[in-house]
Structure formats: C-alpha cells, structure tokens
Image: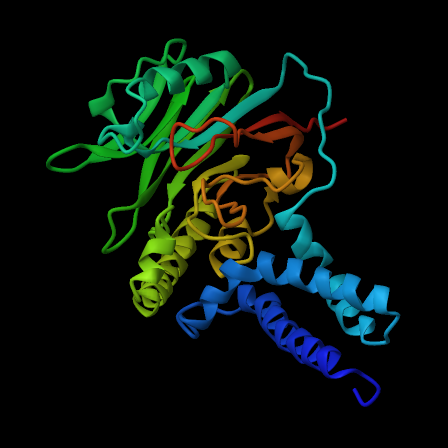
Amino acid sequence: MRNLSLFNKFVFISNIIVTVLTVAGYILPFLAPKLFPVLSVLTLFLPVLMVINILFLLYWMFQLKKQVLLSAILFILGLTFFTKFYKFSGRDIVAEDTDITIMSYNVRLFNYYDWMPNPNVTDDITDFIASHEPTIVAFQEYTTAAKPKLEGYKYKYINVSGKHIKSGQAIYSKYPIVNKGEIIFEDSDNNAIYADIKIKRDTIRVYSMHMQSVKISEDIQQEIDEKQSKKILLRIAEAFTKQQQQGELISQNKLETNLPIVICGDMDNSAYSYDYRTIKGKLKDAFEEAGSGFGKTFNFEFFPIRIDYILVDKRFIIKSFKNFSDFKNSDHFPVFTRLNIKREE
C-alpha cells in the first residue's frame, strides 16, 4: 500500500472490507441461520457484493496495480455463486411430445385486495397460463375467492385456509393426481404441499412450497427512511431461522419417496441461503441449468432478486427455462421449465 495514492489507499481498504463480507457470504450457506441469525441476512446482499467486487477488479486492472489480484482471486472463488445470480447463455432443446412443462407462480391472491390498479388480474393470469399450456401449474398465495377459471386442468389439489379469505397453495395438472399431502410448518401461516402425478407410464412428485416470508416490499426504502432498519434486520433474521426448520421438513419428506421430484415455489430467500442449499440437496436448479440473464422473479426495483425456484430431480433433462419478468400481475413473476425424463438405454 506504500506506493498507492491517498485515494487508492481508501479504495483498497474498501476493497478489503467488501472481500471480507463476500467471503462471509460464501461461507454462510453452509451454516445454520439459528447459529448466526442476523449475520445470515448477508446472503441476501451477496449478489450486490459480487458486482462491487467486479467493479474493483476493473478499477485495479485499468490502474495496472497488483491489488487486482485480491478481486481476481475472489471472483474465481465465487464463480459458482455468480451463476446462481446471472447466466450468460440459456438452453432451448427441441420440444418433443414426451416433454413435461411446469409453471410456478406466486399470484398474490390474484390481486384480491386491489394492490394493483388492474381490475382484470385474475383473467390476465388465467389467459397467460392458457397461452403457455403448462402440463402442471404450482400456485403460491392462491385463493378460491378470486374464482380463477383454468380450463384444461381436470385434476387439482387445492390447500387453502383462513377465516376472512381462504388462501394457500394449489397444484393444477392435466394428468391424474394419484396421491397428495401437506407439509405443515409449525407456528406459521405458510406450508408446502405435494401431488404425485401419473403422466402416461411415469409418476412424478411435484411440490409447491411457500416458505416463511421475510416481508420485503417494494416500499422498503420508505421503511428504512422511517428508521426501521434495525427492526427489518431482526424480522429477516427471525424469518431465516423459521425457514431453516421448514426447509429441513421438506428435505425429510423428499426421502420418503423414490419418485422423480420437482420442487416449485416461493422460497423467500436467495440461492445463497442455507435454506436453498437444504431444500435443493442433489436436485438441479432449472434456472442454473437452462436459464439466462438475471433470472429475476420478484418485483424489487433496487436490484434483481431471484427467490422463486423450480428444482428438478437428476432423472430429468432440463430442456428450457424462462422467467417472465415482463408479466406484472403480482409482486412475483412466473417461472416456467420444460423437462423430459431420462430413459435407460
């Protein structure tokens, strides 16, 4: 640091701080949130830290300074983390008659409480689904009160509860549901459901999960301005601790079946979280396999957030993936994948 200007010394000290925080973000997915509940919140901001590190990398590169090595090593160490945030190229394998298409969508009660000025949200969503004709649709924050009319789905499992408005989750299928069940989350309004679906000669298990909400809203800047940042931090930390317990329940349920598994839903956490790692296990992330761009699934203006997932058994070939970030009829965006079951030669 001796040969650096005063400004560059300040930049390098900032670089070191970002490096320490980023390394902590790399490690936290392997540590249970209940051990470090507040610190685990850092995983939400890991994409931002990685972008800042790239800016440092470019800065030192143009300066021709040896300090570039710190950011270069950090970038190389985090390459696998970066692909969870951004994919440079996608995949779109030719469709076949044997393909299965799955859509997952947190519909936010079909705008039942008029959060958005559009009075036709329910019809827009059902028309959107009809236009893409997914084999199976997994809904989160579903309500029967909106009376969605989804034609072509003879089989469905709807799991809703509540006093004033019944809401919850639903799985719609074009093929028979031969078994179904619920995973109850203790002390929570959220849950996970699953349906075993017989598709021709195969039976698969599809989950729809809605994990404990961290209650991040589009108005979070206003909350911070009102000096509520400490309260927000503690709220998120508490939610992460609950998510850990919920993720472990889903992971345990996975072990109870030998069927090929697809897990859909709103995890309300990043792909760098302990919860994501627990639920995913040996499954494949459809976005990582076949997506492109940021994979944004939540309408948050400050930076792209991916908290909705389709996780797929290794016995599937993931042929394509898409997130519809231009379809704004909820605070979430639909995600869609096309799969095919691998056949033994």
Left/right of residue 125 with respect to residue 16 in the rendered view: left
In the rendered image, residue 319, in percent from the top left (x then y), is placed at 68, 27
Task: Give the residue furthest to the top.
Answer: 152
- Which sits in the foreground, 48 or 263? 48
Could you say which quadrant of the image residue 89 lies in? Answer: top right
Side (left or right) of 209 relative to 344: left
Residue found at x 46% / y 23%: 136
Residue 261 place in picture, x, y as percent? 52, 37
Q: Is residue 53 visible?
A: yes
Q: Is residue 158 visible?
A: no
| Left-right relation of 98 to 216 | right
Q: Is residue 84 above or below residue 140?
A: below
Residue 127 position within the rendered picture, expressed as x and y whole percent measured from the top left: 42, 13
| Left or right: 207 in relation to 191 | right
What residue sits 38% from the left and 57% below the top? Answer: 243
Outermost residue on the right side: it is: 64
Q: Quadrant of residue 194?
A: top left
Most extreme residue toward the bottom is 2
The x and y percentages for residue 238 are 33, 64
- 312 versus 22 height, above or below: above
Quadrant in which the N terminus appears:
bottom right
Q: Residue at x 41, y 71 (%)?
A: 38
- Residue 29 in which image quadrant: bottom right
